Amino acid sequence: MRSLVTRPLATVGQAWLALAATLGGATILLGRILRSLVPPRFDRDETWRQLYGVGVKSAGIVVVTALFVGAIMVIQSAFYVRRTGATSLLGYGVGFTVFAEIGPILIGLMFSGRVGANNTAELGTMVVTEQVDALRTLAIDPIRYLVVPRFIAMIVMMLMLMALGDVFAVIGATLTADALIGIDPQVLIDSLLESHLLDEYLLGLGKALCFGVSISVLSCWYGLGVRGGATGVGRAVNNSVVANAAAIFFIDFVMGWLFPVGL
Amino acid sequence: MNARIGQGFGAVGAPVVAVWRHGWAIYSVFAQVVWAIVTGAIRWREVVRQAYLIGNRSLFFITVTLGFLGLISVYQVASQIQRILPDFTMMGPAFIQLMWREFAPTITGLMVATRVGSGIAAEIGSMVVTEQVDALRMCNADPVRYLIVPRTVASAVMLVMLTIYAVFVATLAGMALADVVFNVDPSTFVSFRLVTTADVALGLAKALSYGFWIPIVAGQAGLSATGGSAGVGWATTRAVVSSSFAVILLDFIISGFGYVVLNL
């Protein structure tokens, strides 16, 4: 009887404690990152390397994802266009979902999978092979040397990849509209331009900026907190992508609430 | 000059060859899984255990993500409707229909790909680098049959369940928001009059195929892990990217097929 009462309570309590530990740890890490940005003291070479590693290496997956996101959203919108006959729905559906809602979420999830997970794995491996301790022994601050360059690289590159992804999503949408659905691309472009394109575009970029912050901070936090060999690294990567996915949906909600498009 | 041309071909060809090899490796695991299922070599006890780990353990995660998705979709759409025509009667039915057709299966699939895919790759990857998989082979136990088949069956079943649950959660969240912010009566919002059998079948077909492919893609990434902890981390990363991409690709294929061929 007692275990029936205490066990669920313990589960809930542990979940809350874990959540509080993550949020607190990530916030402190963010504070330390911001602290080392004023005055800016971090490793410039490592920042360039990270910008290349994060941006160029994940451009391929973002481009392909964006092409398919555009295509899928055209198919889904076309379903309603066929029922109602209103082609303006196409621009509304594609513009809103691709630029402001589903596009940022999917590209953010892909970025979190490709870059965030990779980052956790890399930092985690450095922790378990005691390379981070070695840095500390050499009086090099791991935050300034490892974390801040990744923070900058991820924010900059998430924004640029989002802008790139938007272009390819429109390409994917027009190609699918033409080839699969039989809607003239001109109709799609026209109805896109009639919708609140700029608002949606800026909202998407704003979301990308916040995703960049949350993905970099959370993935670094999980990476630096790895305990216990190869299994620990795997588990940390798992936790990191889960936390990032939850954070992406939360940020998406908050941003959508604060900045509703088309009003 | 020749070296330049060679380099150019190499730069184009290397990714093509890499993608081809990756695809072939996944296809080979897929074939082994299908063969194992056809011949009935399924360890049901393990399937039930994996179903618990994949399904029940994802409930909280799915609740959070799909809840937020439901809230924000309804908020965005309702604020547009409020401005153009203040008639909310079609919003709920259309929302529920779109959830069934597209967003519940696909977003749930992506969440499972993220959570379960990375978990499978991390688990199998660390088994590979600690030579437990080699030990399995020594005992004449096929790693695909022993490790990947139960996860595939469990995840295919559980993703269908989770999708149904996801529609429920998103509808509940959207209903609550529509009621509180826009004064839409829950009885107006929750209406299944637009949802047809075809919509539900399309959504569940998507969920089933995502659930089937995610453990195959992630398990293959785990089995190909090499070298200590760096290898496990790399395999886990590859599992997340490949299985998420598999979900998006399958969504495109099934949606396109449904629209063009079946007129759904």
Image (cartoon, helix red, strand yellow):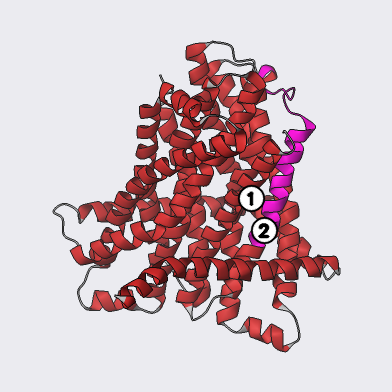
How crowded pointer 1 is (Cα within 10 Å; few <14, some 14-19, many 20+) is rated as: some
- Residue B69: within the magenta? no
Point out the tag, 1 or 2, that comes first from the N-terminus.
Answer: 2
How crowded pointer 2 is (Cα within 10 Å; few <14, some 14-19, many 20+) is rated as: many
Q: Is residue B106 above or below residue B129?
A: above
Q: Is residue B245 above or below residue B62?
A: below
A132 with respect to B86 (left or right): left
Relative image position of residue B37 (x, y in whole percent): 81, 66
Q: Secondary structure at mark 1?
A: helix
Q: Is residue A132 above or below residue A77?
A: below
Per the picture, the main secondary structure of the magenta-coloured stretch is helix
What residue is at 48 percent from the left and 43 percent from the top?
Answer: A105
Q: Most extreme residue toward the top, as rendered?
A: B86
Relative image position of residue A263 (x, y in whole percent): 40, 19
A241 with respect to B7 (left or right): right
> Which mark identifies residue A98?
none
Q: Secondary structure at mark 2?
A: helix
What residue is at 55 percent from the left and 39 percent from the top?
Answer: A176
Q: Are marks 1 and 2 in contact (CB under 8 Å)?
A: yes
Camera-nearest residue between A18 and B15: B15
- Residue B206: within the magenta? yes
Q: Is residue B122 visible?
A: no
What segment is highlighted magenta in the picture? B188-215
In this view, the mark in front (1 or 2):
1
Query: Residue under circle 1?
Result: B250
Relative image position of residue A240 (x, y in whole percent): 47, 58
Amino acid type at circle 2 is Trp
Query: Residue under circle 2?
Result: B213
Q: Most extreme residue toward the front, as rendered?
A: B1
What residue is at 64 percent from the left and 40 percent from the top?
Answer: B104
What residue is at 46 percent from the left and 68 percent from the top?
Answer: B13
Q: Quadrant of residue B21?
A: bottom right
